[in-house]
Image (tube, helix red, strand yellow):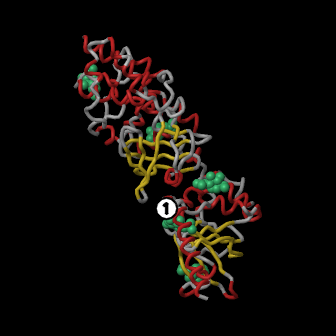
Amino acid sequence: MATSRAFTLFAFTLSLLTVASTVSGHNITQILSDTPEYSSFNNYLSQTKLADEINSRTTITVLVLNNGAMSSLAGKHPLSVVKNALSLLVLLDYYDPLKLHQLSKGTTLTTTLYQTTGHALGNLGFVNVTDLKGGKVGFGSAAPGSKLDSSYTKSVKQIPYNISVLEINAPIIAPGILTAPAPSSAGVSNITGLLEKAGCKTFANLLVSSGVIKTFESTVEKGLTVFAPSDEAFKARGVPDLTNLTQAEVVSLLEYHALAEYKPKGSLKTNKDAISTLATNGAGKYDLTTSTSGDEVILHTGVGPSRLADTVVDETPVVIFTVDNVLLPAELFGKSSSPAPAPEPVSAPTPTPAKSPSPVEAPSPTAASPPAPPVDESSPEGAPSDSPTSSENSNAKNAAFHVNAPALFTALVTIAATSLLL
Ligand SMILES: *[C@@H]1O[C@H](CO)[C@@H](O)[C@H](O)[C@H]1NC(C)=O
Ligand SMILES: *[C@@H]1O[C@H](CO)[C@@H](O)[C@H](O)[C@H]1NC(C)=O
Ligand SMILES: *[C@@H]1O[C@H](CO)[C@@H](O)[C@H](O)[C@H]1NC(C)=O
Ligand SMILES: *[C@@H]1O[C@H](CO)[C@@H](O)[C@H](O)[C@H]1NC(C)=O
Ligand SMILES: *[C@@H]1O[C@H](CO)[C@@H](O)[C@H](O)[C@H]1NC(C)=O
């Protein structure tokens, strides 16, 4: 008896440890992959990136549809519409089968993921859950006059208080949800118009004057994520004077603010890898990393962080965010945070040894590939770090280049030496 209790305690402790070691929590794709009859639903969760959103949350309930029940949605509507319909099936509360049958007064309205999108007017983002007579549980839109057209059929999986997966027999249809226009006709085609309305006029103007808007538009069909700095962001202290950049550098800077894939907030929250941007021209170049702080997503460029502010539009496969700061790629702006102890460029005037120590000291974390073409072309003109304002500043920047790209550094030392000679 005692030993068995001790064993139970041991097993319990062990299971706690196991839980603690898998902090990442649930994976809805994994949960549903065991059941072929949910393959269509599961596939749409991945395509719409709802899976990431679900995985980034706890205390939720996913109401799944089998392939038969999905057939009224699948392939019949634009992806953005299917996403909204499926968002209505993700309840932001934990309902296991027991709780479904213990609703106080037998009925409740519960918030869904659709409510968080900003598309839902009134209570369209709420679902009515009602314990009907005879043990049946009905689901319907909370919009007045809606019927409880879907019913609970069975439990699929519960991870207590984290995620409950329940099967229902039909989609929950909120009024108007299926008739929303597709993004192309809803004005996502007019990216600059959306940006201007969102307070990102400077960014919009730069996209047009540089022609980068064409690059953005060309990827819309297969996926586009835009991080648009607000007009305030361009006025902030420390933002380099863009007129000092070459045309090629401006293009890289602007392309750095977009991804050729659909990555809504939930996907950024669960992201663990470096993300390639439209400016990426080789492994590890012009990429971004992410971190989270509560519900916030922070983007990191290697130069500085920027908070993801608002979602301007999220219409699968296009999502446009505003960000608090201009994203400054390390490839163009180095790491200005690295302090004084980088004296090499100061001693650079005596030119001969300037080149030899730098490649030796830089252990080249990435391959010492040739510098990116845009930057290379720019060197005779006004390179960004060539700023005549203060030599200390330019030294600090050069030091950062030194760390990031030895070949580039060599080029910049040459520039620095040249400018000192002038
Ligand atoms: C439940 O969610 C928490 C985070 O809120 C997580 O740390 C834990 O690992 C999850 N448990 C399971 C069994 O997935
Ligand atoms: C979730 O599971 C799927 C299928 O097993 C896998 O491909 C995917 O990488 C997993 N996602 C995460 C975030 O672990
Ligand atoms: C849910 O819908 C049923 C049927 O229309 C209705 O009687 C009930 O009051 C609704 N529940 C709530 C909490 O509004
Ligand atoms: C895009 O939207 C802006 C602002 O709403 C408008 O001025 C412009 O004419 C639109 N452009 C196109 C091509 O529809
Ligand atoms: C940009 O260039 C101008 C003139 O060449 C110079 O006066 C200014 O300080 C530069 N600004 C920056 C931020 O480098």
Residue 16 seen in render = yes
For disc 1, the marked residue is: 116
Residue 124 seen in render = no
Q: Is residue 354 above or below residue 230?
A: above
The kind of residue tagged 1 is Thr
**Residue 24 x %, y %:** 53, 59
Decide if residue 417 is on the left or right side of residue 404. Answer: left
- Residue under the point 32% across and 29% down: 397
Number of marks in picture:
1
Residue 419 lies in quadrant = top left
Taking depth in this image into account, of 25 and 266 the one nearest to the observer is 25
Q: Quadrant of the C terminus?
A: top left
**Residue 336 x %, y %:** 31, 34
Q: Residue furthest front?
A: 3
Decide if residue 92 is on the left or right side of residue 37. Answer: left
Q: Is residue 134 above or below residue 226?
A: below
- Residue under the point 37% across and 39% down: 326
Q: Is residue 207 above or below residue 132?
A: above
- Residue under the point 40% across and 33% down: 330
Decide if residue 358 is on the left or right side of residue 223. Answer: left
Give ligand 3's quarter of the image.
bottom right
- Residue under the point 36% across and 24% down: 245
In what element is the residue under mark 1?
helix
Taking depth in this image into account, of 22 and 106 the one nearest to the observer is 22
